[in-house]
Image (cartoon, rainbow, N blue to C red):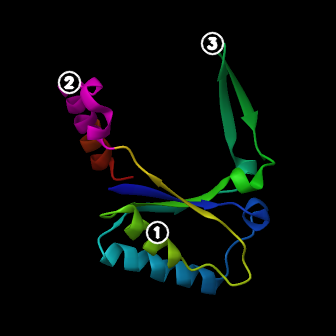
Amino acid sequence: MRFMIILKSDSNTEAGVMPTEQELTDMGNYNEELVKAGVMLAGEGLQPSSKGARVQFSDGKTTVLDGPFSETKELIAGFWLIQVKSRDEAVEWVKRVPISATQETEIEIRQVFEAEDFGNEFTPELREQEDRLRAQSASLGR
């Protein structure tokens, strides 16, 4: 089972406050634990929303909105993509994220869809296309 672990933004991440050396060390050590356990597929921190944009689709039209965005608690500061045996195991990994005692934040855990979740609508042709695209994407190594 794959899960996306979503670290929510706060006023510091939205202000572009960079982590301290100790915070970077702690996060690096946590990420190393995930890798050594064979569960980490990806993980990154994100720039503040002031450097981002949103594209809205409505009535066949698209509108681009430049950041920053005001709903700080609804924004994402970073993420991990992990593969574990259960939601409970994902929760246990999240409980170990190195969050400072003075920091107030929220981390969301969301299961990623797998091919079998789509049932018969995900035809063999669509499955083959998905597999091919995943292989091509993995070979880019960016």
Q: Residue at position x 72%, y 73% from top?
A: 104
Report crowding for label 3: few under 14, some 14 to 19, many 20 or more residues within 10 A (C-alpha): few
| Residue 58 screen position, x and y as percent | 67, 18
- Residue 60 is marked as 3
**Height in image: 99 above or below 116?**
below
The residue beneath circle 1 is 91
Nearest to the observer: residue 89 or residue 83: 89
Q: Residue at position x 33%, y 68% from top?
A: 39
**Height in image: 90 above or below 126?**
below
**What's the residue type where badge 3 is placed?**
Gly
**In terms of secondary structure, where does tag 1 sit?**
helix
Q: Are marks 3 and 1 in contact (CB under 8 Å)?
A: no
The residue beneath circle 2 is 125
What range of the chain is rendered magenta? 114-132
**In terms of secondary structure, where does tag 3 sit?**
loop
3D distance between C-alphas at marks 2 and 1: 35 Å
**In terms of secondary structure, where does tag 2 sit?**
helix
Q: Residue at position x 24%, y 26% from top?
A: 120
Quarter holding the N terminus is bottom left
Task: Single out the mark in the foreground, 3 or 1.
Answer: 1
